[in-house]
Amino acid sequence: MPIQLNDTFTKELPADSNLNNSTRQVTKACFSFVTPKIPKKPQVIHTAEETAKLLGFDKTFLQSEAFKNIFSGAQTIENSQPFAMCYGGHQFGNWAGQLGDGRAINLGEITHNGERQMLQLKGAGPTPYSRSADGLAVLRSSVREHLCSEAMFHLCVPTTRSLSLMLSGDEVWRDMLYDGNAAFEKGAIVCRVAPSFIRFGNFQIFAARNDVKTLTELTDYTIDHFFPEIKSGTKEGYIQFFKAVSERTLDMIMHWQRVGFVHGVMNTDNMSILGLTIDYGPYGWLEGFDPNWTPNTTDRSHQRYRFGHQPQIGLWNLYQLANALYLLVDDPKPFESILENYKRQYIKDFRTMNKSKLGLKVEGPKDDQLIESMYNVLLLTEIDFTLFFRELSNISKADDSVTALKKIASAFYFPTALIETVKEQWEEWMIIYLKRLQLEPSDDVSRKAEMKKVNPKYVFRNYMAQLAIDKAETGDYSLIETFYKLLRNPYDEQPEHEEWYAKRPEWARHKAGCSMLSCSS
Ligand code: AMP
Ligand code: MG
């Protein structure tokens, strides 16, 4: 099955004239041509059928030698011009200069059913943007990226997709915990798929270098291909573009808050211009509710990217994008008003999202207080974020507070802590919630169905990822397939998979890879 590419990025934007694969600063260019490293012994571990469908790939092709070779980097697609993008970014609040695709190589664009998709290998060798690193990725981080991006898609969270997970057959030297205990790990390659992998940082790098010409070209390209409703080449268009990016960014983050996803490294180079969740690194899922939690050990002291701070960081990142696009508009006011609107919209969206999680459709006189007090009681004693909201849907209008509390009891990590003032405060909240439910015209059955559409039953819990990885390290890929299938229907009951609808086991509380991850990948 020959792959028909329909490239625009490399055809319409300026290329780096240097064709050597040497680490360097690349100026006045959006990308550098580079070919993937030939892997020693590629092996397909898993393919995501649904992403394949998006590209028009059939099963026979997925099982072919050509597929294995192309998506491990062993063979280039006919007439293709693989490339790495140039971008910069703010890392942990500081401008880091040029970063770029240090271990991502774009193979080209496919148009299928009128939709454009870029194919990108992650971990396929060094590029001019690799700085001092090797351009490779290890199995553990690749399993995490492959499964989580697909899980997020099925949770209805905007995201990049993953087509395939392969072993490269090469060994990769990594210090997983940054504690001086480096070791060889299995190298792996994921093929990511998205309409575009352009990030905030792609715009920032040209602004930082005062290269208005390339900045304009990149912005016009992005608008023309991905925001066709906006007119490129005009100040008004650039402002509308920023507004659209701001809206998409907030929408994506509100979905993260809804499902309890913590990205972990919201640097501006990890912010997609299309508002897609991108770069699955030390991400994590809230288990015990804690707004200050971050899975990223590199961020442990400042918790810049903690769960509860993600919407504010989205705003901070948009300020940086605004600073870049300002060069095209020369007037700060429209940007300021869009950023102000982000804050207002966040308050509205936060309310709407929480009301939907609570099963509240109509306006109640004290809904804001109900939401606020819910977040207070959630902090009293450790309670599982996913289980709490899912079990809440089992409450009936006719329940008393004791019965209702019993229905969510399985969500508490230490049910014995539900005594005295903790219990009283939970009961108080439950009484208010039950009273509020009486205002809802819908019956229990339909409310329950609605709540189950926004409160997933199955998320890719941190320890699940680690279990799949531990097995995969021994050559057993069965859990990868199990989780891939399970997470395709995260809102469905799936009684045969009840074992994954459970609180984090205690062994996983402080285990590396489960709730603590470094950026080493
Ligand atoms: P991240 O924080 O993982 O998004 O990566 C930040 C920057 O480091 C990006 O420019 C990446 O391409 C680059 N990078 C991360 N890991 C590697 C690696 N193993 N080899 C080369 N570049 C890397
Ligand atoms: Mg990144």
Image (cartoon, rainbow, N blue to C red):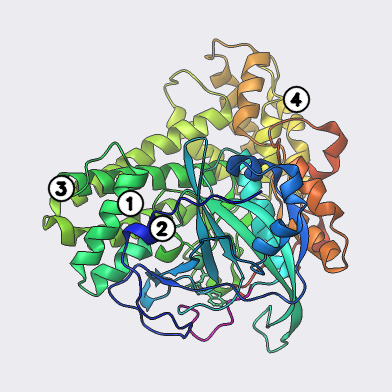
How crowded pointer 3 is (Cα within 10 Å; few <14, some 14-19, many 20+) is rated as few
Label at residue 198: 2
Label at residue 137: none
Amino acid carrying label 2: it is: Ile
Residue 91 lies within the magenta run: no
Closer to the chain start, of discs 1 and 4, is 1
Question: Are dots 2 and 4 in contact, CB under 8 Å?
Answer: no
Outermost residue to the left: 331
Provide the residue span drawn in magenta: 129-136
Secondary structure state at the residue bearing disc 2? loop
Count of numbered tags: 4
Secondary structure state at the residue bearing disc 1? helix
Closer to the chain start, of discs 3 and 2, is 2
Image depth: mark 3 or mark 4 in front: 3
Disc 1/disc 3 C-alpha distance (Å)? 13 Å
Ligand 1 near label 4 (Cβ, under 8 Å)?
A: no
Q: Position of residue 107 (x, y in %)?
A: 53, 61
Label at residue 222: 1
Image depth: mark 1 or mark 4 in front: 1
Disc 1/disc 2 C-alpha distance (Å)? 8 Å
How crowded pointer 2 is (Cα within 10 Å; few <14, some 14-19, many 20+) is rated as many
For mark 3, what is the residue? 234
Q: Position of residue 267 (x, y in %)?
A: 44, 65
Closer to the chain start, of discs 1 and 2, is 2
Amino acid carrying label 3: it is: Thr
Question: Are dots 1 and 2 in contact, CB under 8 Å?
Answer: yes
Please indicate, yes or no, whether residue 401 appears anywhere in the rendered image. yes
For mark 4, what is the residue? 403
